[in-house]
Image (cartoon, coloured by chain):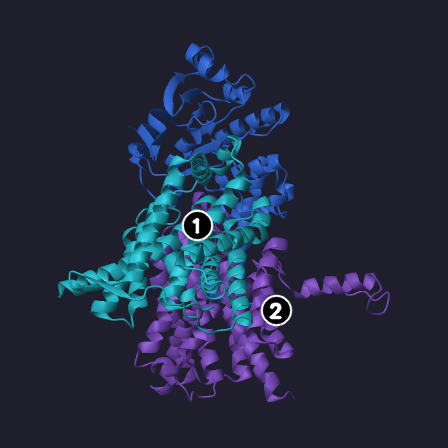
Chain colours: A purple, B blue, C cyan
């Protein structure tokens, strides 16, 4: 039906969404900023690549391994840095250092094959596999957000001191959100590795981390569907426009500042795109005689 | 010390850098009593609250809750022991709905499910523990909203409420934590005399209904004189006077430092 | 362990540590007053390395004149970043996170703008000292290193005097302690904040040019300008002495790790030290921001 090129773009949109949804829980719902998320993606990508290539294990074992190692790394980084609980800036800056340290480690370890990277990976990231994983991740994320844990996250984002005074362990809530986002990043990395089928440290630099955060912010704070759509837009625009990489990044930077100055909640801030919402929109448009036949009512 | 002392402050001092925000304060709050801390602006009243709830750590001194030394405990532990508070500059979870603000406090002491269940068992279209718990919580939260009289706003976002109702929501959230000691930081700030009178009644009713000891900071003298069994006056972080409202009203030191200095209060 | 090598490593560490300190001070100054992480600062430092380079090559300025040009240019750039990206947020009382993201955007913008216009080349500064090293106690010390140390100390001393002794400096400190109270006492917050960005810009002007001389000017200097933030966290965010000591400690540790342990894993060590310090002291060595105003 589609050419393999289009399938490729769709796959990229999907695994970027997986990474970004996790980050949305962390940034959009818990109110913390990470500038080292590419490092969690890298850990996932390398873990999965090594498990499937060196140890010849099946892909799903690689994905689980990726989730576990990324998660573990996030706890190691998160525990000391999120303890200074009212100032999350400590965490953000540490993630910068973490990203840099991770690149240096990947460039020098033997098992990661240094700066040359690992090639010849199995072509396991079939669009349907990725789609299934994306659906599971979205479902789990939705469950997270609409549970007491999600509510605690939002309360910490809205006011950490009031959250403490509502008996919430702020450090634990932040650490849990970080763990969640790192696991998503790890899974996304595993898929990425087996889609590109070749990974090297320079693919996971801090610019990439900043871009993930930019997608979450542009998509909307406190939204899951917003960042997903932003992930697709950010993935497809360069494909369509074919502009030079640097000018694209210049524009991203300007857009980020403009969003903060003009509409800080992002495109879909604090809102979700739901079926009910779409119906309401359609109804509103019909009322204005913009689309559809007149007089046709849709039931809720 | 026994159960009839809800709160005991002993030699409490807090210094920020070289400046002592509060110095050597000591007082006791009897169980079931409503006590007021008064003093001019910047006297260190809110600092006392922040020390009791462990937002700040005291430089010196100890804090006892029902006989137990709670100095240096984590804020969330103190809340779990049975102390809840409101804030001078209202601190609500603005983007959450009114009812969710209460639920956040409510589900703390008695969670019905754990993380793994929340993440992996909440299937769509299937009735389960998580959905059931949410419905129960909502019903329970409504009771607290009813108690402070803002039930009709349950599904509005907290930030959309008018100022006075936000204060009431803060009280509802604090009550949902099931405290035995309630700290109210200027609950009547920004309210007109009519609203203040209403709030005075509300606090009295709630204290009786929930069996609360109450410690409050307030500038509205009619509220303080009407409501409090006992007053503690501080000035520049130091103890100035203590006693029943009648005694304090006629204390020349207080009149000079406080009532004289702030005639409009 | 040879004594002259030890001495030489210490001087190298102090030189780079001094530059880290300058960067961390500029960053921390903004943090202390606006309470957010100014990630655009790295971009300003990078611009400074180009400003110094062009001042020396195109205008033929000597090192002192180039330093002054770079400081002045970056003061203007820094002030402009405040007016464009932060001042609208400040007027709206936006939470610190929005400032931080705005700063991130600005940082991406600056870095890639240089990439797209000047290109990803390395620009080496002209030779400043004919003889690059002098011998003290058998150790070969870089003249540029010594110059950087002396200049950093002078710059920090002047700023210290300004912050602690002058009326304006006291206004800045008052605003950083409590901006509301400071405003009530007649401090013009907008002017004070503008001034803080001007000072931070001037510090970026110095440190960026020294970095350019040491490592050449190029757009992708993020890996080194990030050290400013890391040094500030080690010292404790928002604390000026913390920023100075954090920078010096980081510089010296890096020099010793490179010489005596491993140069490839140097940045991993810096990161490990950051983590260890935060484990022992969650607010950094001189941190005072564990307790937020309620």
Q: Is residue B228 visible?
A: yes
Tag 2 near tag 1, CB within 8 Å: no
- Whether discs 2 and 1 lie on one chain: the answer is no
Give the image location of residue C150, x and y in percent: 31, 53
- Which of these two is toward me, C184 or A70? C184
Q: Is residue C268 above or below residue B223?
A: below
For this view, does C18 lie left or right of residue C98? left
Local SS, label 1 = loop
Q: Disc 1: which chain?
A: B
Label 2: how many Cα within 10 Å (few below 14, some 14–19, many 20+): many
Query: Residue at the spot x=36%, y=65% of the render?
Result: C214
Looking at the image, which residue is at 58% across and 76% down? A244
Q: Which residue is mark 1?
A: B110
**Residue nearer the viewer, C275 or C286:** C286
Q: Position of residue B140 (x, y in %)?
A: 54, 46
Task: Name which residue lies at 49% across and 38% down.
Answer: C179
Name the side, left or right, on which B226 lies relative to C234.
right
Q: Quadrant of the C terminus of chain C?
A: top left
Quarter of the N terminus of chain C within the rendering: bottom left
Q: Which residue is mark 2?
A: A229
Q: For this rendering, which residue is in front, C133 or A210?
A: C133
Q: What residue sits 41% from the left and 70% below the top? A: C124
- Which chain is indicated by disc 2? A
Instruction: Depth check: give the residue in front, B202 or B196.
Output: B196
The number of discs equals 2
Task: Count residues near mark 1 (Cα–Cα under 10 Å), then give few for <14, some for 14-19, many for 20+.
Answer: few
């Amino acid at each position: 039906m589609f050419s393999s090129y289009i399938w490729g773009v769709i796959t990229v949109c999907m695994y970027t969404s997986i990474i970004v949804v996790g980050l949305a829980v962390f940034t959009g719902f818990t109110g913390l900023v990470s500038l080292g998320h590419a490092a969690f993606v890298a850990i996932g990508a390398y873990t999965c690549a090594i498990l499937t290539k060196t140890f010849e294990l099946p892909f799903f074992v690689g994905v689980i391994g990726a989730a576990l190692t990324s998660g573990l790394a996030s706890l190691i980084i998160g525990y000391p840095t999120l303890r200074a609980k009212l100032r999350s800036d400590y965490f953000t800056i540490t993630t910068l250092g973490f990203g840099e340290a991770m690149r240096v480690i990947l460039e020098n370890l033997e098992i990661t094959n240094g700066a040359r990277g690992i090639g010849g990976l199995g072509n396991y990231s079939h669009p349907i596999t990725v789609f299934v994983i994306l659906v599971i991740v979205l479902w789990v994320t939705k469950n997270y957000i609409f549970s007491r844990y999600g509510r605690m996250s939002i309360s910490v984002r809205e006011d950490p001191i009031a959250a403490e005074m509502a008996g919430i362990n702020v450090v634990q809530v932040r650490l849990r959100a970080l763990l969640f986002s790192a696991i998503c990043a790890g899974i996304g990395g595993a898929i990425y590795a087996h889609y590109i089928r070749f990974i090297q440290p320079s693919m996971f630099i801090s610019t990439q981390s900043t871009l993930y955060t930019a997608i979450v912010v542009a998509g909307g704070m406190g939204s899951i569907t917003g960042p997903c759509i932003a992930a697709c837009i950010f993935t497809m625009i360069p494909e369509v426009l074919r502009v030079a990489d640097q000018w694209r990044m210049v524009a991203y930077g300007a857009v980020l500042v403009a969003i903060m100055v003009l509409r800080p909640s992002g495109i879909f801030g604090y809102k979700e795109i739901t079926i009910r919402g779409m119906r309401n929109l359609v109804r509103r448009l019909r009322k204005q005689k913009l689309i559809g036949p007149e007089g046709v009512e849709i039931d809720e | 010390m026994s159960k009839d002392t809800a709160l005991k402050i002993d030699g409490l001092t807090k210094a920020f850098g070289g400046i002592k925000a509060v110095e050597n304060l000591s007082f006791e709050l009897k169980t079931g009593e409503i006590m007021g801390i008064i003093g001019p602006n910047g006297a260190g009243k809110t600092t006392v609250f922040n020390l009791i709830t462990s937002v700040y750590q005291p430089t010196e001194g100890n804090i006892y809750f029902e006989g137990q030394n709670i100095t240096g405990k984590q804020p969330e532990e103190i809340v779990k022991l049975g102390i809840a508070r409101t804030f001078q500059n209202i601190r609500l979870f603005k983007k959450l709905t009114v009812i969710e603000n209460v639920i956040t406090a409510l589900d703390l002491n008695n969670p019905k499910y754990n993380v793994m269940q929340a993440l992996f068992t909440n299937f769509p279209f299937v009735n389960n523990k998580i959905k059931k718990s949410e419905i129960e919580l909502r019903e329970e939260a409504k009771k607290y909203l009813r108690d402070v009289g803002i039930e009709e706003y349950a599904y509005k976002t907290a930030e959309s409420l008018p100022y006075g109702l936000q204060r009431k929501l803060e009280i509802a959230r604090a009550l949902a934590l099931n405290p035995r000691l309630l700290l109210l930081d200027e609950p009547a700030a920004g309210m007109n005399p009519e609203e203040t009178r209403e709030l005075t009644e509300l606090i009295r009713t709630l204290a009786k209904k929930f069996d609360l000891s109450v410690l409050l900071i307030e500038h509205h003298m009619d509220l303080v004189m009407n409501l409090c069994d006992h007053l503690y006056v501080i000035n520049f972080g130091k103890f100035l006077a203590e006693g029943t409202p009648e005694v304090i009203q006629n204390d020349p030191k207080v009149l000079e430092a406080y009532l004289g200095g702030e005639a409009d209060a | 362990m040879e004594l002259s090598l030890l001495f030489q490593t210490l001087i190298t560490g102090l030189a780079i540590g001094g530059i880290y300190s300058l960067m961390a001070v500029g960053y921390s100054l903004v943090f202390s007053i606006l309470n957010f992480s100014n990630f655009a600062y790295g971009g300003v430092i990078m611009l400074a390395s180009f400003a110094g380079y062009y001042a020396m090559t195109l205008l033929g300025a000597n090192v002192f004149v180039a330093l002054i040009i770079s400081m002045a240019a970056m003061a203007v750039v820094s002030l402009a970043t405040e007016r464009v990206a932060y001042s609208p947020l400040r007027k709206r009382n936006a939470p610190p996170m929005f400032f931080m993201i705005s700063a991130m955007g600005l940082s991406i913008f600056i870095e890639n703008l240089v990439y797209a216009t000047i290109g990803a080349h390395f620009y080496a500064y002209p030779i400043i000292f004919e003889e690059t090293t002098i011998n003290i106690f058998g150790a070969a010390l870089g003249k540029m290193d010594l110059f950087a140390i002396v200049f950093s100390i002078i710059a920090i001393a002047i700023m210290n005097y300004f912050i602690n002794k002058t009326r304006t400096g006291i206004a800045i400190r008052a605003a950083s302690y409590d901006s509301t109270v400071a405003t009530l006492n007649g401090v013009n917050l907008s002017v004070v904040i503008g001034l803080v960005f001007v000072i931070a810009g001037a510090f970026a002007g110095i440190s960026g040019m020294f970095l350019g001389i040491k490592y050449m000017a190029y757009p992708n200097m993020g890996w080194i300008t990030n050290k400013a933030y890391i040094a500030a966290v080690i010292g404790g965010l928002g604390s000026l002495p913390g920023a100075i000591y954090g920078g010096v400690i980081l510089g010296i540790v890096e020099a010793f790790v490179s010489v005596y342990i491993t140069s490839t894993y140097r940045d991993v060590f810096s990161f490990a030290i950051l983590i260890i310090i935060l484990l022992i002291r969650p607010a950094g060595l001189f941190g005072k921001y564990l307790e937020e105003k309620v």
